[in-house]
Image (cartoon, rainbow, N blue to C red):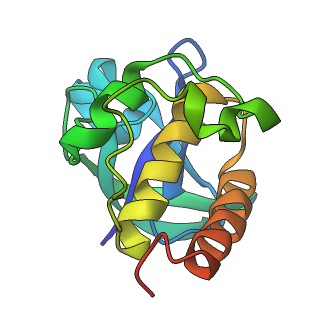
Amino acid sequence: METGRILRFDEVRGYGFIAPNAGGEDVFVHANDFGEQRHLVHPGMRVEYEVEEGERGLKVSTVRILDSAPPRREHARTTAAATAPFTPVTDRDHDHDQLPAGDDDGLCDVLSSREFTAEVTELLIQHVPTLTGAQIAQARQHLAAFARSHGWVES
């Protein structure tokens, strides 16, 4: 069994795609694959599934919902940032005098590569829902390499 998150799901058309946690090609999933739970499906939902090769690419052969509520953050420190609106970083943001008092304790959380990848995936799904699984996988790969080169994640 593999795990992933619902990348997008169209209730009207009755299908969607799963972004595998391990990266790689999006996996097609049909509403009927969820049976009576099809009304619970939403983007970001964690699922466990088995894959088979279909005529048009990968598709789910079996799927099980791992959580029905919106995903919760594992890191309390990132919760406020995750719920705040996305703001791009500008050159002036690097001026430490502009940081609110108390926000910079000089320390940062070092995440495992897996935790970092999960956080990046969540942010991309929440803020850029039109990305495909392949685009998300490519962004994750480059961001993880960048983070490793700066010591932001464990190797």
The location of residue 87, given as percent across then percent down, is 64, 23
* Residue 24 visible in this rendered orientation of the protein: no
Which residue corresponds to the image point at 43% horizontal and 74% vertical from the top-left?
Answer: 113
Residue placed furthest toward the right: 91
Q: Is residue 92 visible?
A: yes
Q: Position of residue 59 (x, y in %)?
A: 56, 57
Position of the N terminus by quadrant: bottom left
Kindly give the residue lying farthest to the bottom in the view shown: 155
Q: Count the marks.
A: 0
- Quadrant containing the C terminus in the rendered view: bottom left
Q: Is residue 113 left or right of residue 131?
A: left
**In this picture, is 21 found above or below 46?**
below
The residue lying toward the viewer, choosing from 101 and 55, is: 101
Q: Quadrant of residue 106?
A: bottom left
With respect to residue 75, does 40 lie above or below?
A: above
Give the vertical position of 59 relative to 84 (above or below): below
Q: Residue at x 57, y 31 (%)?
A: 97
Rendering coords of residue 47 (x, y %): 31, 50
Image side of residue 121 versus residue 33, left or right: right
In the foreground, 23 or 55 = 23
Q: Residue at x 68, y 33 (%)?
A: 93
Q: Residue at x 19, y 40 (%)?
A: 76
Image-quadrant location for residue 15: top right
Coordinates of residue 22 in the picture (x, y in percent): 48, 72
